[in-house]
Image (tube, grey):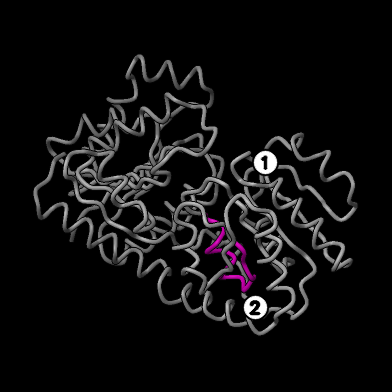
Amino acid sequence: MMKVLLIYLGRRGAGPVISKRLTAALSACAETSLILSSFNENGAFWTGLERVYFIDTFRTGFDAFASLASRSFIAPIMRKIEAVGPDIIHFPMLHPWSPAIIAAVLKKIPVISTVHDPVAHKGEKNLSLLFLDGLSIKRSSGLIVHADYFTETVSKRAGTGAPVFSIPLGTLSDPACPVIFRDPSGQIKNILFLGRLERYKGIDLLISAFKKLKAKYPGICLTIAGEGDIRPYSAAASSSQDIKFENKWLSGREISGLLSKADMLVAPYISATQSGILPMAYEAGVPVVVSSSGALPEQAGFGKYARIFQSGSSDSLADAMNELIENEEICSEQVKNAKNYSERDINWDRIAGLHMNAYNSVIGTGSRG
């Protein structure tokens, strides 16, 4: 049986759910181990998995820089890798330490890396992290993206001829507090934005579109939920009592709760790769509106699973939202299609199988970067 080692060294975000669900699903077809940061903020989340190992990482930017300068992390993580003896190593999400770890093991063990953000988001300022991600991409034996849209982009970034595999992003709901599917109510009132509050997310466009619809549908309300700076949106939102912010880091249970109350999810991004929120909305039976940015149209089934509007246009967004509010038949058909897609194409057993195909392909070619 193949020995697979996943290394996830982040502390929170989508990474823990991806790592846990992928590890659990892979364990049915491979001897799967997982190395984690001992500083991750998910605690008991990892119970139920076998062969989980922890390593101290860092909590601050200064500590991150110091660790990279000293390279003190190499020896302890190499000891854990040697103890596992994997046939292949997979980084389900890149980390500042990834380039050094890949360089240390690559002559002996092939490494495959998942690239969640093949291109920088608009306004991205962390140039050092972009540089380190670029090194990881160039050093990897194989690469995974979450949409066909980005396979050529990542292949060019690597510049090594390493194979690039397109594997869709599975649902990111926490198995401990799963998203529950519910049929659309037929009346859309509660509109939801879910995610970090960043300029590239297009929140100002959503507020503008909401205000246009509010005149036609007085009963609708908007919840903007997620961690980040709300100051750029406060003035625009202050004129409406029906725009509510939940400005904090959201647990898996809180995300599930918000989706259970939502009648529509909007992803108004002006710069995007893909969204981890979309598969959760599909799983929950929540109608979705997404922008035409990046790989979002592909993730939306090119209109089959979600309405698509012209990125950057509040008028186009308002029209797409209005279409779902007005047309119950279109809304129900979209939710039905999204549910089928969720169950058939992005369940974790299927995704694990696609990963096994990628691992076998990289091992079979003997690629070492």
The residue nearer to you, when weighing 87 against 210, is: 210
The picture quadrant where one finds residue 191 is bottom right
Residue carrying label 2:
331
214 horizontally vs 170: left or right:
right
Q: Which residues are magenta?
A: 275-289
The picture quadrant where one finds residue 190 is bottom right
SS under mark 1 = loop
Residue carrying label 1:
227
Q: Quadrant of the C terminus?
A: top left
Are there few (<14), some (14-19), or many (20+) residues within 10 Å of tag 2? many
Q: Is residue 46 magenta?
A: no
* Residue 263 in picture, x, y percent from top left: 72, 69
Determine the residue located farthest toward the bottom in the rendered image: 329
Specify the amino acid type for callout 1: Glu
Picture residue at 49% right of the left edge, 79% below the top = 340
Picture residue at 53% right of the left edge, 37% below the top = 122
* Nearest-to-viewer mark from 2 and 1: 2
* Residue 201 in picture, x, y percent from top left: 61, 46
136 horizontally vs 39: left or right:
left
Number of numbered discs overlaid on the protein picture: 2
Picture residue at 18% right of the left edge, 45% below the top = 162
- What distance separates the C-alpha of mark 2 from that of mark 1? 29 Å
* Residue 306 in picture, x, y percent from top left: 56, 69
Location of residue 59 with respect to 8 vertically, above or below: above
Upstream in the sequence, badge 2 or badge 1?
Answer: 1
Q: Are marks 2 and 1 in contact (CB under 8 Å)?
A: no
* Residue 267 in picture, x, y percent from top left: 61, 56
The residue nearer to you, when weighing 317 against 168, is: 317
Q: Is residue 278 magenta?
A: yes
SS under mark 2 = helix
Q: Quadrant of the N terminus?
A: bottom left
